Image (spheres, rainbow, N blue to C red):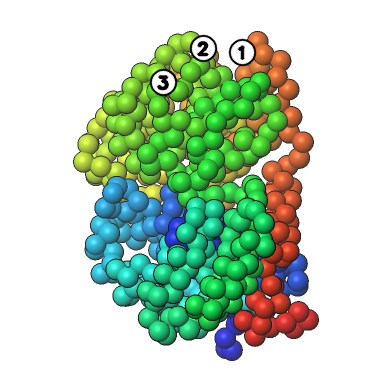
Amino acid sequence: MQKKPNIMIQGTASSVGKSLITTAFCRIFKEDGFRAVPFKSQNMSLNSYITEDGLEMGRAQVAQAEAAGLKPDVAMNPILIKPTGDKTAQIIVGGKVWKNITAEAYQKEKPALKSTVLEFYKKLENQSDLLVIEGAGSPAEINLQENDLVNMGLAEMIDAPVILVGDIDKGGVFASLVGTIALLPEADRKRVKGFIINKFRGDINILTPGLDKLEEMTGIPVLGVVPYGHFDIEEEDGTAERLHSRQRKGGIEVVVIRLPRISNFTDFHWLEMIEGIDLRYTDVASEIGTPDLLIIPGTKNTLEDLAFLRDTGIEATIKKVHEAGSMICGICGGFQMLGSWLHDPHKVESERGSMRGMGLLGVETTFEPHKTTIQVNGTALDQYPVKGYEIHMGQSNLLESVKPFARVKGLSEHLSRDDGAVSQDGKVWGTYIHGIFDNQKFVEALFKKLNEQTGKETSVRITEEFAVYKEKQYKKLADSIRESINIDKVYQLMGLKLGD
């Protein structure tokens, strides 16, 4: 088969905008009539997604697939690294757990994974007109250049021209671009065909002399300068600005506990957008206050994050908030923490063995070696249609003091089953369903109940479906990038032109 056109987006560092630029290109190429498919060979994130066939992949490639008008496919992100500690991680290959391994050991395993990466890439080539590839971190990490399979190592394997993105908002963009080029081997330097300067604020005329000097020093053209803008597209980085947002005034107050190993914080994306909801994140007990709704989110390590809540006084504060009448909710790992006991006989998550839970829900959880990864749909609280996905190692059993939160069925399951738990008074509940707050009727009912409980008369207005809102954001992003970057030059780098 003839090689398909491709373009690769690399960056001078993490969080410079690689994912957004890749997402924008996917939408632009779609608008121009191409079937553009995203690809990131190796992603490191605790925010993941479960495909229709029960496979796990990074959220950034899900957003890129949506922007391209495609269903997410695990081939778009064949390797997902989910850190479990400072030096350890769970490695997902082809959507399934491969190994729990140290960082040092993983480096030794990487050469064997190159054939896997190429296998998935070639699968996507068969399904596409062109491919938009995202790198990871920086290609100038000289300690990682040997056996690289996500930056220049991948670019060489698939023969991809590279665009290097730098973030001017933090300062030092010229040094980071020139320094990155200087640290690359000569063959890799030749692959870099253009620069994009991202997150610019100010007068472009003041920047122009620097752009000219940059091109003179490197011999590489600047393809565009992207202005700083707010594009409300789901993020997967734990340093995301939304995790440090502060409360607005006047609405139903929602607090999400910012766990050290927080995962799938995209669960709360839509809540942040709904008029009448004031949502903020915190990891400090004194900042919790007395919210109307307190949420304990998912985590990659339930036992260690429960220990964090206990050691910092947050657990005690959560119990005081509960006694004061606030509603308490747990998602996945947060649901497990609310229970009576958590048992880890196989040391799946940590060496702690068993831990006492918060005791706010009559639930007991045991962690098993097998990981549940499945899309589900069903009915919550006996009446509200819900859908989402599950990712968890723990299996929870309900005690007599609670009732199930929902009745659900997976796409591959024939019989429905119970999910989650709700206290008798309805003020404490938990679920394994990620994406539960993306379900409109459930959210409307939940906040109606919160209004009744608090005596507030806050109007929580959902003006459009989440999918419609996201489409508008993809269009807004694509328009901004199209106006800022020489897209014709990007097509030329791929050997294409409009009309091909």
Kindly indicate the quadrant of the structure image that contains residue 106.
bottom left
Tell me which amino acid carries mark 3.
Ser
Residue 212 to residue 24: above or below: below
Q: CA distance from mark 3 to mark 2?
A: 18 Å
Q: Amino acid at mark 2?
A: Gly
Q: Is residue 442 above or below residue 123?
A: above
Relative to 25, 369 lies left or right: left
* Mark number displayed over residue 453: 1
Quadrant housing the C terminus:
bottom right
| Residues marked 3 and 1 touching at CB (< 8 Å) | no
Residue at image location 32% in from the left, 54% down from the top: 89
Q: How much space separates mark 3 and mark 1, taking CA atoms? A: 24 Å
Mark 2 surroundings: few (<14), some (14-19) or many (≥20) residues within 10 A: some
* SS label for mark 3: helix
Q: Secondary structure at mark 1?
A: helix
Distance from label 1 to label 2 (Cα)? 8 Å
Q: Which mark is residue 286?
A: 3
According to the image, label 2 marks what residue? Answer: 325
- Percent position (x, y) of residue 318? 42, 20
User: What's the residue at 35%, 51% (across, down)?
Assistant: 83
